[in-house]
Amino acid sequence: MPEIPELQHISQVLTARLAGRPITNVDIQKPIVIRLPREDFEAGLLGAEILAVRRSGKFLLLETDRDSVMAVNPMLNGRFQWIDGPDGKRKAHARTCFTLKFQSDEGELGIRYIDERYLGKVYLVDAEDLDQVPVLNEQGPDALDPALDEDAFLTRLKRYRGQVKNALVNARFIAGIGNAYSDEILFQAGIHPFTKISSLDQERRIRLYAAMHETLNWAAGISAVEIGNRIDRKPRDFLNVHRKGGQPCPRCDHTISEVSPNRRVTSFCRTCQPD
């Protein structure tokens, strides 16, 4: 699942290459991911000009000059890919859901939206109705929202019970963090993922907030370099613990543990993150 570090960079790349370009063609191959009638989606986008692409939590929001927004929730496997990418022309992907082509100085520029499981959801709404998009309208503040300062974070954390990892991946608590980066944040904070929030003292709560910013900013810098213009990539090899079960911990050299409660892989170091 793409999270803040990848989506932050992808939104910037899409803005740089698509802003100011009108959409010249809309081709829907698998309408299952589009949450409105095919005709309305095509008519709403054809001829529209992309103004900017921004991120909100795990959503990509493509703003147009028609005061409308294409809101993309990629879920587990959704991603965009250049039709004519930096590595040359690519063959059509079997899991392509729709393609958009844009007018550019060099000719036609195109992107396709791919989803291996067709779990993603794509909406096209008036900008004033963005708060009606499911999930987007229920999510809490973005993890990197400047307004979410330490005090605001600690206040929100008081409302939640249960395990700390469950809170981090709960978009209603904080938006933009998923399974991979919740593991990394908790490793940075030295907190066991199954620790009850009620058992966290003030010092560890503050450490959790700091670790969230440190981890996401660290990963965003690396992701930007590794992704470059390849917006379909999701680099994760550089992570410290996530999906590294059985490997030595980069901090203490003990073996990283990996468990899968509720089918969600959780990776952590029992030495650096004591229960």
Image: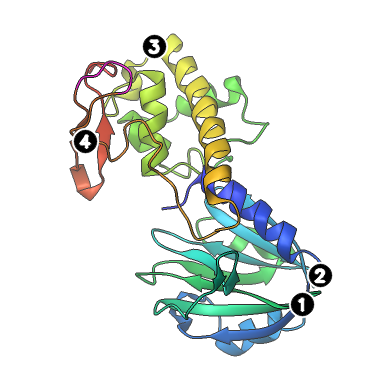
Out of 244 and 175, give the one closest to the viewer: 244
Q: Position of residue 25 (x, y in %)?
A: 67, 85
Counting residues from the start of the chain, the first of labels 3 and 1 encountered is 1
Find numbered disc 4 in the image and state the secondary structure of the residue it sits on.
Answer: loop
Q: Choose mark 4 or mark 1, whichever is in front.
A: 4
Residue position marked by numbered label 1 in the rendering: 48
Q: Look at label 2 and name its amino acid.
A: Asp
Counting residues from the start of the chain, the first of labels 4 and 1 encountered is 1
The residue depicted at 22 percent of the width and 31 percent of the height is 247
Q: Look at label 3 and name its amino acid.
A: Asp
Structure colour scheme: rainbow
Find numbered disc 1 in the image and state the secondary structure of the residue it sits on.
Answer: loop
The residue depicted at 53 percent of the width and 43 percent of the height is 223
Range shown magenta: 250-254
Residue position marked by numbered label 2 in the rendering: 65
Give the Cα separation between the discs numbered 4 and 1.
47 Å
Is residue 56 among what the camera can see? no
Q: Choose mark 2 or mark 4, whichever is in front.
A: 4
Q: Main secondary structure of the magenta part?
A: loop
Q: Choose mark 3 or mark 2, whichever is in front.
A: 2
Give the Cα separation between the discs numbered 2 and 4.
47 Å
Q: Look at label 4 and name its amino acid.
A: Gly
Q: Choose mark 3 or mark 1, whichever is in front.
A: 1
The residue depicted at 62 percent of the width and 82 percent of the height is 41
Residue 201 got which mark? 3
Give the Cα separation between the discs numbered 3 and 2.
49 Å
Is mark 2 in CB contact (under 8 Å) with mark 1? yes
Q: Residues within 10 Å of mark 2 (few under 14, many from 20)?
A: some
Give the Cα separation between the discs numbered 2 and 1.
6 Å
